[in-house]
Image: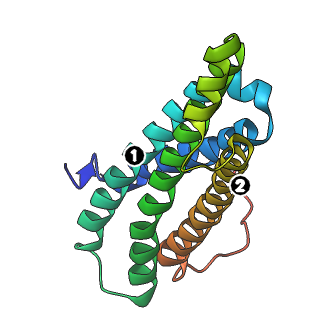
Amino acid sequence: MPTFISGLPVHVLVVHAVVVLVPLSVLGTITIAVWPAARRRYGWLVVGVTALATLSIPLATSSGEDLRDRLPRTSLIRTHASLGDELLFFVAALLVVAAALVWFDQRRRQSEAGTGSEKETGSVALKVVGVPVKVVAGTLTALTVALAVVSAVQVVRIGDSGAKAAWSGEQYISPQPHEG
């Protein structure tokens, strides 16, 4: 991947995918976690957006590493890079848990739609190591919300540290009146 395009660091361009897709994934996963009707209708779409967000993170970190190698080593850049490296773990875990929640909910609804012995067999099959279906669903919901919140916080921390790394040496001046 090139480090610059027309003099602009690729990282500055690629990072916008993360800045848009991760918060969108966070909002979507929280929505499908707490609102079953949204989960039924948009669950797999949210999982797809979260997968795109997950895929965009290595592109951003790779382009960031290329840019970092061309900049002076500072503690602000090290902090930003370290925080950026952690994001993939949180968002990938969010992807897995959100997919499990949507899949489990879909299977549960299918088993409830069955009749007689199919319904009983489906309910038993959804039990995980003897844990009731409601406990599994509640655990997946709680994990989804928790990982979404952690992912959102991490994106804000990364953005803040990146802004500090990029702009900490800048001095702003008062606007000057335009000359005629």
**Residue 174 image offset from top left, x and y in percent:** 73, 73
User: Which label number is shown at residue 123?
Assistant: none
- Give the residue at mark 2: 142
**Residue 82 image offset from top left, x and y in percent:** 41, 77
Question: Circle 2 sits in a helix, a strand or a loop, which is it?
Answer: helix
In-front residue for pair 82/113 = 113
Residue at horizontal 67%, vertical 75%? 173
**For the residue marked with disc 2, what is the amino acid?**
Ala
User: Which label number is shown at residue 56?
Assistant: 1
Q: Kindly tell me whether residue 44 is visible in this rendering.
A: yes
Residue at horizontal 61%, vertical 15%? 118
**For the residue marked with disc 1, what is the amino acid?**
Ser
In the picture as drawn, the residue positioned furthest to the top comes out as 115
In the picture as drawn, the residue positioned furthest to the left comes out as 1
User: Could you say which quadrant of the image residue 31 lies in?
Assistant: top right
Residue at horizontal 22%, vertical 73%? 69
Few, some or many C-alpha atoms within 10 Å of disc 1 (few <14, some 14-19, many ≥20)?
many
Q: For this view, does 69 lie left or right of residue 180?
A: left
Q: Kindly tell me whether residue 9 is visible in this rendering.
A: no
**Residue 29 image offset from top left, x and y in percent:** 65, 42
In-front residue for pair 52/40 = 40
Residue 26, above or below 171: above
